[in-house]
Amino acid sequence: MTSTRRTVLLRSSWATVNIGDVAHSPGVVRAFQRFAPEVEVVLWPVRLEERERSMLRHAFPGLRIVDGTLGADGPSTPELAAAIDGADVLMHGSGADAFQGSEIDWWREHVGRPYGYFGITVDPLCPPTTATLPELAQMVELLPPSYIQDDVKDRFDGADFVYCRETLTLATLRGQKITGPDLAFGPDGTFAFDHTDAVAAARLLEDFGLRPGRFACFVPRLRYAPYAKIYGTEPTREQMRRDAVNRATATHDLAVLAAAIETWVRVSGLPAVVVPEMSYAVELAHAQLPQLLSPQTLDQVRLLDRYWPLEEATGVYAASSLVVSMECHSPIMAVRHAIPAIYLRQPTETTKSQMFADLGAPDMVIELDHRAAAAVVAAVTEIATDPAPAAARSRRVAGNADDRLRAAVEACAAGRPYRRGPAMRSLRDRWRRDRVLLLLALPGVTALLLFHYLPLGGHIIAFQDFQPFLGVWHSPYVGFDNFEPVFTGDPVFLNALVNTVIITLIQVIFVFPLPICLALILNATISERLKRLAQSILYMPHFLSWVIVVALFQQMFGNGGMLNAWLRSADLATFQIIGVPELFKLMITSQVIWKDTGWSTIIFLAALSRVDPAQMEAAVVDGASAARRLWHVTLPAIRPVIVLLLILRLGDSLSVGFEQIILQQAQVGAGAGEVLDTYVYNHGIVGGDWGTAAAVGLIKGIVGVALVLGANRLAHALGEQGVYAK
């Protein structure tokens, strides 16, 4: 391979409670060692325990593993940042779906180098659909081309390669008009995994009294993995549904596996060992299989009483005569070592089961329908009588998988040539592409220039004895005389400054967090209709002017307002709330909360919509409680938005609402109601001291800029992007 790209960053290792999932990452690494040894693969795991890390260290001594997460604010660890900087290609490893969507988005936006998918399944039907593989193939053809979500489609279209681990996923993506990447069939990375722990395997055989090549392995499972039970969490509604399905079908499905065991023991006269691919299957096998077997057969059956490591499993499979599995990956591991294998496919399984037919062995798969028992008895009898054809079939499947893996590895290692991005387009190309958006932005940009940037020139008044009739060109220059009230501690100015700072602190502490909390509550609302109704009600106060809001509060809480009128009618003591200087700051804060909290949730709700569902589902699978999901998934996802808005709020901290306060200042007096905005108004517009008012306004602006720059620098130090990147 002549590609200059030599480093692949592999995002993989989705779970550790299933040795099939564990096998994905080392399988892909092994494929690269075999077919592209000059390429370095750096593993970036999602979930990797010490047992699996130890296996990887023994199997691949030179493998570099980097830990960390990638959010909107970038890599969470220096080692991940270095790996991203040094990677030529980001490769999504083999798995049951296209995970980590937000990470792909970040890579596209901030890195721009090639990325793609290696051996994935995209099944839009199962679950919850139950169907055979032919039925799934028909359903895939009938899906409308707009079925896949736009953001998912965009990620596939932007990829440099997408290798589907079976042709039903390939048909799904083609039917959804995915045309951007190199789209092809590429098997599960587990097909390349060949590492075994021969010592551990020999010890297990000795403990069970087994001889190499003189026993068969049988792997049980339920239709749905009971993740709530595995992780000890409260089951969700969907998990409750799946548990009900499991309880209703477990006996039927395991009876087919029991028929395979009975047939093997009877025809071959050799023992059987029942082993787990997932951790929960240990308890399942001990609880249910013995009662489905005859006493004579049960004497020849060994039940493994622990969840075994991947390398021990492959060592035992390699020493067996046959592997019959209700899980998908154990047959793959057997095939790698030319061991006959049978896969009992449950109707809840995804389209990934099609991979065996795609590799030339459709007869390896037996659908668990009403004909399954007879089919498995015939298949096991044939292999027990003459294993050579089944062993040849396994070698053929492994060879076909190698051919496909070689092509996939070369494409993933090379990526596609860098495509000309937006930054390299000519000005004419960008204008042609974005002219509609630019024209839409023109009125807003014009208003910004006229009312925000051009008036900045008026700050020259701060250094003049400004006379309106002389104008800025002829008013006399007085230097810093207008700043004297600020620097000499004018009591009126200091009172306005103290009031402003106190109100700002109150509003940052009490007002700023409320939209976040409210957005989280709304986002958690199950009923979309209730959510939309609540949003409509909460947004309405924002559209009321401050004149109306102040009038409403006076009508409610004034001396003659509704509250005191009710208290008088009930012969209760009345409260003086409006017009009390001591309560003024809390009163205006409550008005801000009532008026703008609902409206401020919009941006946080938009941020919450970007929380990666895959991360949330992974947290649920890991057993995280709702509180932990909130703390470790939701809040980190919207943290950049929170930091950005907090920085902008600090930049505006010396402006606390001129219109709201000037409307109520007369009731409480200047001692409680004078702030910097009203100070500028009273001295400039009312008192005619234009220079002093301009000087205070200029200082406000300088302090605001300093706060934004300081807060942004602090955000960078804490790993956030802030208002702008470094």
Image: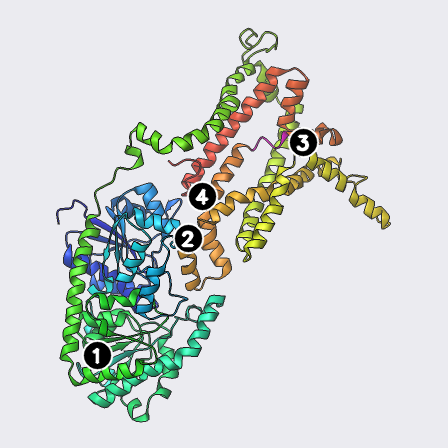
Residue sitting nearer the eye, 526 or 702 = 526
Q: Are marks 2 and 1 in contact (CB under 8 Å)?
A: no
Q: Specify which label sits upstream in the sequence, 4 or 1.
A: 1
Instruction: Describe residue 623's horizontal placement relative to residue 517 as left or right.
Output: left
Q: Position of residue 702 (x, y in %)?
A: 51, 25
Q: Which residue is mark 3?
A: 661
At label 2, the amino acid type is Asp
Q: Position of residue 494 (x, y in %)?
A: 64, 26
Q: Which residue is mark 4?
A: 640
At label 4, the amino acid type is Pro
Instruction: Describe residue 555's horizontal placement relative to residue 299 as left or right.
Output: right
Residue in the image at 40% along x and 60% along y = 618
Nearer mark to the viewer, of 3 and 1? 1
At label 1, the amino acid type is Leu
Hey, which quadrant is residue 323 in on the image? bottom left
Residue 155 visible, this angle: yes
Q: Position of residue 56 (x, y in %)?
A: 24, 62
